[in-house]
Amino acid sequence: MSAPVSGESAGTPRPLRAVALGGGHGLQMSLAALRRVTTDITAVVTVADDGGSSGRLRRELGMLPPGDLRKALSALASERDSERVWARLFEHRFGGNGALAGHAVGNLVFAGLLEVLGDPIAVLDRACELLGVQGRVLPMSLEPLDMEAEVVGLDEDRDAVRTIRGQVAIASTPGRVKRVRLTAVNGQAHPPRAAPEAVRAVLDADVVLLGPGSWFTSVLPHLLVPELREALVTTTAQRIVVLNLVPQPGETADFSPEQHLDVIAEHAPKLRVDAVLADTDAVPTPDRLRAAAAELGAQTLLDRVAATTASGRHEPDALAASLTAALERRTDRWR
């Protein structure tokens, strides 16, 4: 299913350069599908998580929250037995009630390597070597970021807007999220800065995936970092949005598929998209989705990409096949 492109020397093919942006389980699913399409994959990961083991390490050490970075590493780890052992170890969590309770081993390894090497990119590259990753895992910013959201539906006046702070609070709010924004850590005045390596990866890519995942807290944050947003606007890569299978309580409760596209347009008005991929059974009004996609400049591809054994999850082989179909529609752009 691999889709080679022309290399820099005549007649020498190279793998498709793919970049997936997101965080958490949604990004893991994108990476699992892309592994079936190409060997040159870069994950660009959100760094606003403030809960669980990641939040504790972030508060205690001032480091990037490692949880979503660790999940991306595990998703791209080699299938060889030697590397799979390390991937399993990275995902292992300590139990009990002591100081280590709830920490994932990979998060602690990241913290230790950061103290030794001092550079989060070097840490991630070393972790890629350890896990046999073909490709890279990069943070969208080199500093942890804070997140705020404008939320309605929390007061007697259902239209009253309240500001919710923190990724975990936003993801779990019973209200309806209208808009999100990022700030540099500790409320510093400068806008969030992108990791230069992440910007370069987007600019050099053949295809960029946005979604699936928690829409406001994992997908949209990439559009809120000015340099990364500009890279997404100007890249010559094919830009594909992969929609979720079901709305998420709080973040996108009662959202239609087309509303997911509307908030992309609100947060990044200049962004154009080449294709929107959605599951056939998750789109009750296809014409509305096609119209919303067309507003972003995109074609709509409806396919059956849902897993039959896990509700709300994509099936990697089916998603890979649909991504390949989307790429074949526009291969003239990167061949």
Image (tube, rainbow, N blue to C red):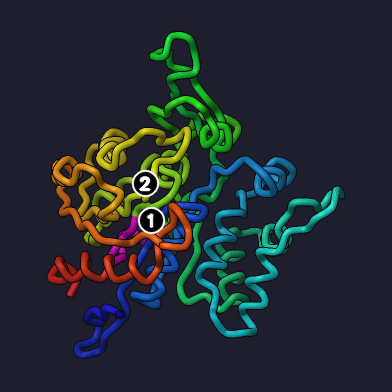
Q: Position of residue 164 (x, y in %)?
A: 52, 25
* Amino acid under disc 1: Val
Label number found at residue 199:
1
Q: Position of residue 244 (x, y in %)?
A: 37, 49
Magenta span includes 208: yes
User: The magenta stretch spans which residues?
Assistant: 200-209
The C terminus: image quadrant? bottom left
Give the side of residue 37 with respect to residue 114, left or right: left
The residue at which mark 2 appears reads as 227
Residue farthest to the right, as pictured: 98
In contact (CB < 8 Å): disc 2 and disc 1: yes
State the separation of the CA atoms marked 2 and 1: 7 Å
Indicate the secondary structure of the residue bearing disc 1.
Answer: helix
Q: Quadrant of residue 185?
A: top right
Give the side of residue 282 with respect to residue 184, left or right: left
* Amino acid under disc 2: Glu
